[in-house]
Image (tube, rainbow, N blue to C red):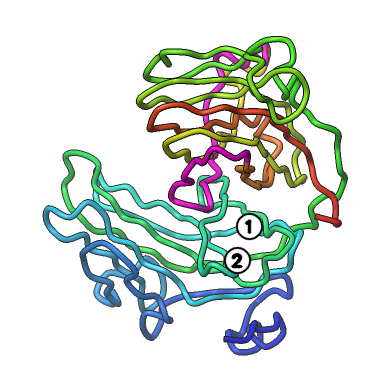
Amino acid sequence: MPSLSLAVLAASLGLASPGEVAVWQFEHGLDGFSRAGGSGQVLHETAHPLQGAGSLRLVLAQRASELRVVSPEFPVEPWNLYRIRVRQAGDLGTDLRLDVEFHGPAGWQPGSTFREPCGAIFGAGPRCDRARLALILTVPGQALGRSALIDEIRIQQQEPMIKTKSPNLLWDGGFELDQGDMTYWVTKPKVMAARPERPREGQRCLHVEADRTYLVFPSIPVQAGRLYRFRVWVRGSGVVWPGLHKLAPSDWDSMRVDTAQRVGWAPPTAAEIKLTHDWHPVEIIAPCESRRIVWFQPYLTFSGGQVDLDDAQMNSLDNSE
């Protein structure tokens, strides 16, 4: 399906502002929103809408874990930040998450969003020109109901991202000295140490043995409006999943990393990556959408035996990427 131009979509939707690339108000129906996963109903609510003549109602089925609904696709420009504004209300105990997905060679892939009280901010990467929203309704515990209302979704282009390439922001990413500030979550690895056996480059690589663990890299200071890439070379047996937490200090006076809280998350672009005996890169690209975000903390979920890591890098990117 060809990409829609901003002008064509703006004209078809009757947008109020030149900077808005999509608006859905659900006055006459579902506006193209449809169920894409989970179990439940997607309804046009006219009896008790949040605003105007209609709203979008999501109803999670009994005993279902989630209901996933996607929007029609809309155009975005690479290297730009966008803000999502939305009116929503849910039954007490429900959780409605708003995500963004981008279309690429492998189909629709999850993007990164920074949540705000009335919406979210997301950034379109170098080769992103089509996006869609994903609404995920869950009931994580006891609740008074299983539905949520959504109305007046507005997506507005904010500003271009800064295109500046940086040197490697990870100190000793080649593990030439020792394992550095590398740590783990949940389960302590059986072995975790810098070793000289067949590194990709240099004199050492990090060797880990574990049935399952989360390998956590040091927290790295970042700047708002820039696009970052975390990359590490891996080999071994088992599988890995890359991820990246976006952190903010819980106490802005002390700015301590050890008491930081997660305010955003960049999902992996693949469900899992199978390790082999040859070195190959694992990477994740994510924007820093807000000045609220101070650090990125990359990690690898690892399962299956042993893994070697080498040449870890975190860089802000320029237009050549």
Q: Is residue 50 above or below residue 258?
A: below
Task: Give whichever of 314, 143 is nearer the camera.
Answer: 314
- Marks 1/2: CA distance? 6 Å
Q: What secondary structure is found at the residue carrying circle 2? A: strand
Q: What is the three-letter code of the residue carrying label 1?
A: Arg
Residue that label 2 marks:
155
Residue at (67, 39) in percent of width and height? 231
Front-lying residue, 285 or 89: 285
Q: Where is residue 313 in the image (x, y as percent from the top left)?
A: 73, 33
Residue occupying image coordinates x 40% and y 22%: 210
Part of the protein shown in magenta: 254-279
Q: Pointers 1 and 2 in contact (CB under 8 A)?
A: yes
Q: Position of residue 273 (x, y in %)?
A: 48, 46
Side of 125 relative to 33 (left or right) = right
- Asked whether, in this view, residue 55 is left or right of residue 256, the answer is left
Q: In this view, does 281 lie above or below 53?
A: above
The residue sitting at the left extreme is: 62
Q: Is residue 256 magenta?
A: yes
Q: What mark, if any, has residue 83 been given in the picture?
A: 1
In front of the other: 22 or 258: 258
Q: Tell me what residue is drawn at x 65 percent, y 35 percent.
A: 232
